[in-house]
Image (spheres, grey):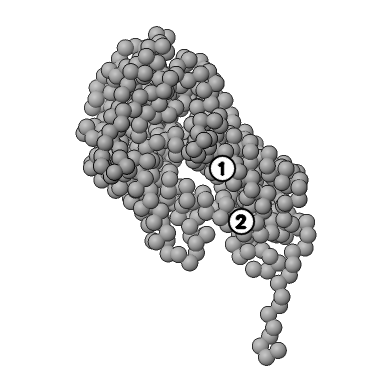
Amino acid sequence: MSNGLPDYLKAAKPNPMSNRAPWYKNTAQTYAGIMLWFVFWTGIPLGSGLAAGSPYSNFAGGVLSHGLGLAILSVILAALLCHFLFYVVPGMLGMKTGLPLYIVGTSTYGAKGGFLMPGFLMGLLQYGWLAVNSFFAGVLLCAPFGYGPLTVPHAIVTTLWAIAAAFMGVKGIQYVARVATFFPLIPLAILLILVISTIGGVADFDSQAMIDAGAAVEIQNEITLDDGSTGTETLTAKSALTTFGVIALICTYIVGFFATAGAAGADFGMNNRDGKDVQLGGLVGIAGATIFAGVAALLIVAGVHGSGKATDAAAMDATSLMGAVMGNEKIAGVFMYLLALAAFPPACFSSFIAANSFKTTLPNVKPLISCGAGTLVAVILAVSGLAGDAMGVFTIIGASFGPICGAMMVDYMLSGRKWPGPRAGFNMAGWISWALGFVVGAADFIPGLAGKIPCPPMAAFIVGAILYFVLAKAGLEPPVLAMENTLEAPVATEPAPAEPETPAEGE
């Protein structure tokens, strides 16, 4: 490197304006495909599942315990938070610089630190997404044959799914991309069919009956005892959520799910022409698609129970109710396979992003080893059922990227709504704000803090933003390094120390 600028920053080339396209040709449709993923919307009525892959909520009545109105308003609130707080700033940074997340992130985390955060972290978490995708795709593919999670058929299907997606993501992503644009039409069509089939029962939905049914559910869960033997525990739902509890749970679910996609707004924004494209792409593809998918899932569950079609009075998972909605299990089986098919491209894209991240941050490690290890971890998470705890996964992702998005937003605002450029070494303002923000976001997994932090992903965002502001004002930001190869070239605040010249041979 010269003048303190790492080679990967010197090699970065901005996406020129000639390669940009309108918001409806890239950002909106790509984000809509993410928010229409069945794993996302099918679990919104539950909020938090009682057990991995079960159709029952961890809270009696789920998020419908206070009726449809509050749940719908909560979905709208969460969708707007995703757009305005988690996406807009990364999107504007990408649009203004033409550079991806792992480059623009070097302002908030430093030229050396940004290599790991958010670059490597983004790739690492993609294998978590691959595990979630594989687990739930396996659930849908095995359900028509009567096999559920933690069975041998589910383990086989899940493993093959993860390996195939990882292989396609590394080797054949260009072929998947050619058809992926049309795949979101599958869940869109299925959601519309299910809503039309259940809308007549919405007016008769009884939230108290939903609470009573949920409170009566008991699930026998197999556990390993302290002596190594196998035993069982009985899982039952917690009491119904309060009004604030419904709002907080829906925001936790949706914001946690979206957090990494929000930070990746830089990668989407670099394909936008101007700020209007960034805003419209997000309002339609993020806020609009989230509201549509979330509200549709709520209407389906309320409608099927209100109409009396539901054969299981406590089931709140939208996909598990498709047979009751359509009155035909074979049609439901077809829907399940179509939804699983539509989920394959996202699995490939997760693998593709992870592979690119590892190739950039671990250039001396063969992709077969790094990506293979990541895929193996994804398989273990999926087969063991750990990836089936959607809320747990979303909470960890929100804890990881909530403070990143918060710190990036403050960094952007303090720099005059522009990218200041890469900062030398490690930006401790960013790293400290992330570390404490992550602890707050992951509070539910920390003994003594579990249940004490409302909406952990948003709390992590707020802590990350406030701490970055305080630490930046305290002078913990290192100097900016000069970098000319951007559309909005930053100016160094201090001249970087020049490296000593290598003496010529013989001197």
Q: Residue at x 25, y 39 (%)?
A: 230
Where does the image place residue 254, in percent across and percent down from the top left?
50, 32
Mark closest to the chain's N terminus, 1 or 2: 2
Residue type at tag 1: Phe
Where does the image place residue 44, in percent across and percent down from the top left?
44, 27
- Looking at the image, residue 9 lies above or below residue 203: below
- Element at label 2: helix
Q: Quadrant of the C terminus?
A: bottom right
Residue 333 in view: yes
Q: Residue furthest front?
A: 227
- Element at label 1: helix
Q: Quadrant of the N terminus?
A: bottom right
Residue 335 in view: no
Q: Is residue 304 left or right of residue 467?
A: left
Disc 1 to disc 2, C-alpha distance: 16 Å
Where does the image place residue 444, in percent across and percent down from the top left?
49, 35
Q: Residue at x 35, y 37 (%)?
A: 136
Q: Residue furthest right?
A: 494
Labelled disc at residue 6: none
- Looking at the image, residue 368 lies above or below residue 108: below
Where does the image place residue 154, in percent across and percent down from the top left?
26, 40
Q: Residue 39: which quarter of the image?
A: top left
Which residue in the structure is indicated by mark 2? 113
- Looking at the image, residue 225 lies above or below residue 10: above
Residue type at tag 2: Gly
Q: Is residue 352 left or right of residue 324?
A: right
Q: Is residue 391 left or right of residue 262?
A: left
Say which of 181 and 389 sits in front: 389
Labelled disc at residue 438: 1
Badge 1: few (under 14), some or many (20 or more) residues near its Cα, within 10 Å?
many
